[in-house]
Image (spheres, helix red, strand yellow):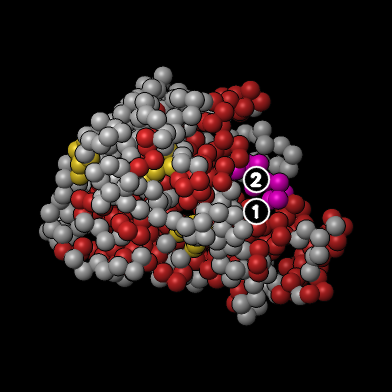
Amino acid sequence: MRKYLRNITVGAALLLLAGSCTDKFEEYNTNQYQIHDADPATLMKSMIETIVNIQQNDSQMQDQMVGQLGGYLCCSNTWSGTNFSTFNQSDAWNATPWNTPFEKIYGNFFQIQEATNSTGHYYAFACMIRAITMLRVADCYGPMPYSQVKKGNFYVSYDTQEQVYTSILSDLANAADVLYNYYVETNGNAPLGANDPVFDGNYSGWAKLANSMRLRVAMRISGTWPGIAQEAAEAAVTHKAGLIESNSDNAMLSCGTQSNPYQLAAVSWGDLRVNANIVDYMNAYGDPRMPKFFNKSTLAGKTDKYVGMRTGDADFKKADAAGFSIPAYTATSKLMVFCAAETAFLRAEGKLRGWNVGSKTAKAYYEDGINLSMEQYQVSATEYMKIDEAPVVSHESDVVQNATATITNTVSVMWDDSEADNVNGKNFQRVITQKWIANYPLGLEAWAEYRRTGYPELYLCIDNLSDCGVSSQRGMRRLSFPYTEAQNNKANYDLGVAELGGADNEATDLKWAKKN
C-alpha cells in the first residue's frame, strides 16, 4: 500500500510543480488514482472524531470531566474521590486530555503526511484537524509539542504558547485556502465522502469552519498578542470561502453507529447531569431554549422544573443524584462543533475591540448571535431580546445537595446603547454570557473563555480539595503537564514549565487567561 501511495503522490507532486499548490487537484482524485487499501480519506474519519469526542470514554474523560469546569454539565459520580470538579484529579486522569489526542491524531496524521509528501488537499485537511484538536490541548495545558512533533517521537521540544497558537492559526489559514480552491476547481468534488461525519466531504463547509475557528483562536489570544489576533481575525472574515454564518452552515458531527456520548453517560451510565450554572442562568432569563437543552428533574417536589447539579461536591451518592436534569439528547443526536451564533458573537467582540471584522455594529452582531441561536433551536427570540434588567441567578437547596448559592454580577439581554464600544463594560459581558449559552454543551471552550474573560460568573466549588492553592472563586486555571512528560521528556518538560512563568500546577494562569 505504501508504494502505491508514493506513486500517486509523485503524480500529484508533478502537478503541483506546474502551478500553485492548489492547482488541478481533481487529477489526484479520479477513480484511476483512488487508493483501495487505507487511503487518506479513510484515515481521516477517526481524526475528525477527535475534534469533539464521539468515543464514549474519550468524551467522558475530556469533554465531560474536564468540560464540566465550563458550567454546562456535571459528573454525577464521585468514583474514587479524586475528580476534576473538586480540583484533585488523579495523575492518570490528568494526563488523558493530553495523551489521548496525541495518540489518536498522530498515527493517521503521519501516514497521510508520508502518502502526500506533505502537500495537497488531504495534507491540508489533516493539518486543520490536528489544529482544531490540539487547540483543546493547548487551552488546557499551555506550551506543548506541536511544530516539532515527528513520526515516532512525541517527546520533543515544546512550542511556547505564542508559537502554538500562531502555528494553529497558520494551519487553519492554509486549510481554508487549499480546501476552498480545491472545491472550486473540482466543481464541488467531495473526496472524503462518507468518511466525513460533519460535512459529507464538502470542502466548502470545512473551509468555512477553518475560518470561523480562526476567529475563535484570535479572540482567545486577543488580550495577550493583539497584533497577531487582529490580523488573523480580519483575514478570516474577508476570506473568499466565508464563515459559518447561517445555521445551515453549522458544523454538526454525526455519531454514526455510536451513541451520543452525553446521552449514554447520562441515561445508561448515570454518570452525567446538567450543571446548575447553565440551568440557573437560563431559568433567570426565562430562556425558551431550556426544553431543547435539558429534560426536567425527577427530584421529589421539583418534577415540574429544570434543576441542575452543583459541581465540586465530594459527598453525595450516585443514586441520589439521578433526579437532577439531564441533557436533552437522544442516542442519535449530533454533536455540535461550531455554530453560526458563535461566529456572530465573535464578530461582536471584534467590533468592541475596534477590529475590522464586518460592516455591522457590535450591537447588530450581538443580536444576530441571539437570533441565530434561537433559530437553531426553533424558538422565538422576541420576548427574550426585550429583557432590560439584570436577573439574580440563584440555586435552591434540594434533597441531594444543601448548596444554595447566588450570583448577582449578571447583565440584561438588551444592549446598552449609551455605553462606548470597548471590552471594559457591560456590553462585553453581554456578548460573552450569550455566547456561553449558545455554545452549550462545548464545555472545554466554555472553560477557556471563562478563564479568559471571567464571564459569566460561576458558582463556587462546593468542596475544594486542591493541594496547590486553586482558588474556589477563580477555579482551576489549567491542567498540570502529564506525569509522563516529566518522566520521559524531562529536559523539554523543564523548559515548558519555565515558559509557563509559574509552577506546573492547576493554580497557574496561562498567558491569555489572567483576567478574572
Q: Residue extending furthest right?
A: 3
Q: Main secondary structure of the magenta part?
A: helix
Indicate the quadrant containing the C terminus: top left, top right, bottom left or bottom right: top left
The structure residue drawn at horizontal position 52% and vertical position 31%, both measured from the top left corner, is: 94
Q: Foreground residue, 468 or 425?
A: 468
Q: Which residue is mark 2?
A: 104
**Spatial separation of the CA atoms under disc 2 and disc 1:** 8 Å
Query: Left of 454 or right of it: where is 338?
Result: right
Q: Amino acid at mark 1?
A: Ser
Residue 148 figure quarter: top right
- Tell me what residue is drawn at x 12 percent, y 54 percent: 389
What residue would you read off at disc 1?
46
Q: What is the x, y in percent for residue 369?
A: 31, 63
2 and 1 marks in contact (CB < 8 Å): yes
Residue 472 or residue 149, whichever sits in front: 472
Q: Quadrant of residue 502?
A: top left
Where does the image place residue 381, in percent across and percent down from the top left?
25, 67
Query: What residue sits 85% from the left and 57% below the top?
Result: 1
- Disc 2 or 1, which lies upstream in sequence? 1
Secondary element type, mark 1? helix
Q: How many marks?
A: 2
Residue farthest to the top, as pictured = 467
Look at the image and tell me whether residue 275 can be seen.
no
Residue extent of the magenta highlight = 101-110
Q: Residues within 10 Å of mark 2 (few under 14, many from 20)?
A: some
Question: Which residue type does callout 2 highlight?
Answer: Lys
Give residue 57's position: percent from left, percent from top: 57, 42
Query: Does residue 102 belong to the magenta stretch?
Result: yes
Where is residue 213? Give x, y as percent: 47, 57
Residue depicted at 46% across the width and 65% down the height: 250
